[in-house]
Image (tube, helix red, strand yellow):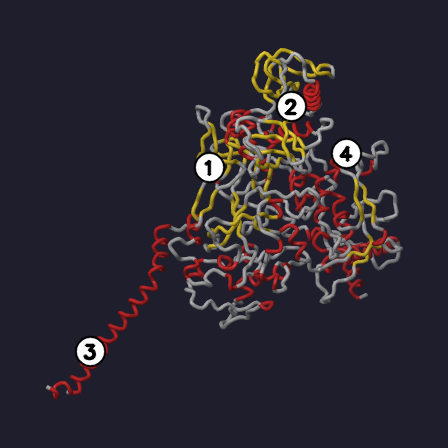
């Protein structure tokens, strides 16, 4: 009680000081009466308040125990009310209030994963950007709230906190930009409907195997922000979609009894097995998160690799966890572990968790050598390596990432390519194209391996700079220009509605078959028979055979073919109800035009006779191709690739946007010249964006230099003369191509000839040894002669 007594006395002193008057008059505390009673009550209250406030400081201090407490605690909702799971419509649990009795939520919010918008915090070494990827418009724009080179601030490209959370909440940890202050909420956002995305404490610290990052992503995409953590942690089932609710809906409105199918209000049904009779839930908390929790957002894998072939990081294979090096306190200010971090963030202790800090140690302050080998790290001797290597190269150059090749390896990351969201339909994408390793000199003047991506975006030129345009603005200007594949898909889906089709509708073009896969995307395969290269045929795949959708018949015959006309009617009826049909479907064949009138097939005269049968759209009395020529060329060019634009489409969209507009892709800026021709130029805005990599770390026997100097130094060195080729959504041969040495800031001639010298070094060594022997023999003879003269033996012989 001594501590509490002291705090009450402190409160007493505060009140005494407050009541003291300038003229020296004070309240007579020693007298019994109303003033004394008032003073005593207020002083005790202030003392208790001081105790409560100081308790927060105690929560920040480690008590010394190496054991994490069992978390059997009451769950609390965002109104700070205890959750009773048996209620009809309980609210989802809130980490802010559930964890608050023991952990200071606002202190956690200062951590690295939540403080990106904190303008007062140093940006530090560049990290991976968030990539605004819109495949249809060919937008791959790197974003970051931190001031890193080549990355755009989301606020500068029109993204509000709401927009950013909807786009990237799938891999956000919650908090930060996803939990904006009330003053920062914009009118068009839907925070009142969805709730704010609080810090997902369980996303990292839940030791239960029920923790599901995919469920978190699904709930976020449904805009069920306040419900996402409960669903992902396995505390209960969440149904409904906030994204379908009206913008005026409020949490206190409750469910809509008149709508139980479409606009279903999100709700959580807690698992009663997790609660005891006092409604306390057992949370299986891990003080040190498992690697799987980190890798949910930080995985990187080469394209085309199989999971069973992947070796992973040598530290993981040795038993270390991510948090063994990337540590943090209650403030969650994560150690990033790169050289120079201690200077960037003014945290000297962080230097101990770099490569050199663990393996080499640090010299003692007063001379001598410090300890090395933290956590069993071996001490590398680097015998035979010239000292200059350690002055100009980071440790990761030799030990991290894939080995150098003619071109860098293409990889996908969780955040950029939406990895780790599982389901029947995978959400992962190949775009954006990220390659590694590319060796670039950092702020410390040392080379380090980097990941590189080439930005792609539409922009308007303003005052000599390019301002990126949002995808919705591009779609509004482009019309159907970018809908080539979707146009084919809509037609094939409509043809599925033909009664008794008996197979799968397909499109045959240029000797290839195009058909829909279960994800609604076009798959392409070779046509088994000879087909005209310049004719588009709608067909049906039946039992391994491809048969024309429309049979051959003569519309001018005296006796009409009833089976053929019935099939024409079925096809036109299916196309007539297609969503988004630009006009009325018709069949043109010779001098006949077939159309649907009042549900029946009608034959009229074709104003533009044709030899072959053609399905078309009748728009304002004019027959337009069912599938436009430019769209046909786009499908031919793009199907089977991960690219989504052709130069023809880019030219058409730029023409629609008007002058002073460009498209950036593959390291080039595309624009229309005065004659309307698409040209390509160079600009800093098209330069690649890069960020250093540290993992995966290879074992020492796979490090560069293990096989000798020629691992890096030879005439055709892949380390120095590999090629980095620009790549983006635009399928074009006009891309930026750079040699690796240009990223390093090194000259090619010097290093070419320096590397060439290693080819003749073995011969040079033989010549050097022979020359040394000859010179040695001559020196020996000269020495003997000198000795003979000095001793007089030579003169005596004479």
The residue indicated by pointer 1 is 733
Residue 421, percent from left and from top: 68, 46
Label 4 SS: loop
| For discs 2 and 3, the disc positioned in front in the rendered view | 2
Pointer 1 or 2: first along the chain: 2
| For discs 1 and 3, the disc positioned in front in the rendered view | 1
The residue indicated by pointer 4 is 245
Q: Residue at x 51, y 36 (%)?
A: 731
The residue indicated by pointer 2 is 551
- Is there a contact, CB below 8 Å, between mark 4 and mark 2? no
Q: Is residue 749 above or below residue 525?
A: below
Distance from Cα at disc 4 to Cα at disc 2: 49 Å
Label 3 SS: helix
Q: Residue furthest left?
A: 798
Pointer 2 or 3: first along the chain: 2
| For discs 1 and 2, the disc positioned in front in the rendered view | 2
Picture quadrant of residue 600: top right
Considering depth in this image, is 76 or 87 the residue closer to the camera?
Answer: 87
Dot 4: within a 10 Å radius of its alpha carbon, few (fewer than 14), some, or many (20 or more) residues?
many
Q: Residue at x 52, y 27 (%)?
A: 654
Does any portion of residue 376 appear in the rendered image?
yes
Pointer 4 or 2: first along the chain: 4
Dot 2: within a 10 Å radius of its alpha carbon, few (fewer than 14), some, or many (20 or more) residues?
few
Picture quadrant of residue 552: top right
The residue indicated by pointer 3 is 782
Does any portion of residue 16 appear in the rendered image?
no
- Residue 432: which numbered mark, if any? none
Distance from Cα at disc 4 to Cα at disc 1: 46 Å
Q: Residue at x 17, y 87 (%)?
A: 791
């Amino acid at each position: 009680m001594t501590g509490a007594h002291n705090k009450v006395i402190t409160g007493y002193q505060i009140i005494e000081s407050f009541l003291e008057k300038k003229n020296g008059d004070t309240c007579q505390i020693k007298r019994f009466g109303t003033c004394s009673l008032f003073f005593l009550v207020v002083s005790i209250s202030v003392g208790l308040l001081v105790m409560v406030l100081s308790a927060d400081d105690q929560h920040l201090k480690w008590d010394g125990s190496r054991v994490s407490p069992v978390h059997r605690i009451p769950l609390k909702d965002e109104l700070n009310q205890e959750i009773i799971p048996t209620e009809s419509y309980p609210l989802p649990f809130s980490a802010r209030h559930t964890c608050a009795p023991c952990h200071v939520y606002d202190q956690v919010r200062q951590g690295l994963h939540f403080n990106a918008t904190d303008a007062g915090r140093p940006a530090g070494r560049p990290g991976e950007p968030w990539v605004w990827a819109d495949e249809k418009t060919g937008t791959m724009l790197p974003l970051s709230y931190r001031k890193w080179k080549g990355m755009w601030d989301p606020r500068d490209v029109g993204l509000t906190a709401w927009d950013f959370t909807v786009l990237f909440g799938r891999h956000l940890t919650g908090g930060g930009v996803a939990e904006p202050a009330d003053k920062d909420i914009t009118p068009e956002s839907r925070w009142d409907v969805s709730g704010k995305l609080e810090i997902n404490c369980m996303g990292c610290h839940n030791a239960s195997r029920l923790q599901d990052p995919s469920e978190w992503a699904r709930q976020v995409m449904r805009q069920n922000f306040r419900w996402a953590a409960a669903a992902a942690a396995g505390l209960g089932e969440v149904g409904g979609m906030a994204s379908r609710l009206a913008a005026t809906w409020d949490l206190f409105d409750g469910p809509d009894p008149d709508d139980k199918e479409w606009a279903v209000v999100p709700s959580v049904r807690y698992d009663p097995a997790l609660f005891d009779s006092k409604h306390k839930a057992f949370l299986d908390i891990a003080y040190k998160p498992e690697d799987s929790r980190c890798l949910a957002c930080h995985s990187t894998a080469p394209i085309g690799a199989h999971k069973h072939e992947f070796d992973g990081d040598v530290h993981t294979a040795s038993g270390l966890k991510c948090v063994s090096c990337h540590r943090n306190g209650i403030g969650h200010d994560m150690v990033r572990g790169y050289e120079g971090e201690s200077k960037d963030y003014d945290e000297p202790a962080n230097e101990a968790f770099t490569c050199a800090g663990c393996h080499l140690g640090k010299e003692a302050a007063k001379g001598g050598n410090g300890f090395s080998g933290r956590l069993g790290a071996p001490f590398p001797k680097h015998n035979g390596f010239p000292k200059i290597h350690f002055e100009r190269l980071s440790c990761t150059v030799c030990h991290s990432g894939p080995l150098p090749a003619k071109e860098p390896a293409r990889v996908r990351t969780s955040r950029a390519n939406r990895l780790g969201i599982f389901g029947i339909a995978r959400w992962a994408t190949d775009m954006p194209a990220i390659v590694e390793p590319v060796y670039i000199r950092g702020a410390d003047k040392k080379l380090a391996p980097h990941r590189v991506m080439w930005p792609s975006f539409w922009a308007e030129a303003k005052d000599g700079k390019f301002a990126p345009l949002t995808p919705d603005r591009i779609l509004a200007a482009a019309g159907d220009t970018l809908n080539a594949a979707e146009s084919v898909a809509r037609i094939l889906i409509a043809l599925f509605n033909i009664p008794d089709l008996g197979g799968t509708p397909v499109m045959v073009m240029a000797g290839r078959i195009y058909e829909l896969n279960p994800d609604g995307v076009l798959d392409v395969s070779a046509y088994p028979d000879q087909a005209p290269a310049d004719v588009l045929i709608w067909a049906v795949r039946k039992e391994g055979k491809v048969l024309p959708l429309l049979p051959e018949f003569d519309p001018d015959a005296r006796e009409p073919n009833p089976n053929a006309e019935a099939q024409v009617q079925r096809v036109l009826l299916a196309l007539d109800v297609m969503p988004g049909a630009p006009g009325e479907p018709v069949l043109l064949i010779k001098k006949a035009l077939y159309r649907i009138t009042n549900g029946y097939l009608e034959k009229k005269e074709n104003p533009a006779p044709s030899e072959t049968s053609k399905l078309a759209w009748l728009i304002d009395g004019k027959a337009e191709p069912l599938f436009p020529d430019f769209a046909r060329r786009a499908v031919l060019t793009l199907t089977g690739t991960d690219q989504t634009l052709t130069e023809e489409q880019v030219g058409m969209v730029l023409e629609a946007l008007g002058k002073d507009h460009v498209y950036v892709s593959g390291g080039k800026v595309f624009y229309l010249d005065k004659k309307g021709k698409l040209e390509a130029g160079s600009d800093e805005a098209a330069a690649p964006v890069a960020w250093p990599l540290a993992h995966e770390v290879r074992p020492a026997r796979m490090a560069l230099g293990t096989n000798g100097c020629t691992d890096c130094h030879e005439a055709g060195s892949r380390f120095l003369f590999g090629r980095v080729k620009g790549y983006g959504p635009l399928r074009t041969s006009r891309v930026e191509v750079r040699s690796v040495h240009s990223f390093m800031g090194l000259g090619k001639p010097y290093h070419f000839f320096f590397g060439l010298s290693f080819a003749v070094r073995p011969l040079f060594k033989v010549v050097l040894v022979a020359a040394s022997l000859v010179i040695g023999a001559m020196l020996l003879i000269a020495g003997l002669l000198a000795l003979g003269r000095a001793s007089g033996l030579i003169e005596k012989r004479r």
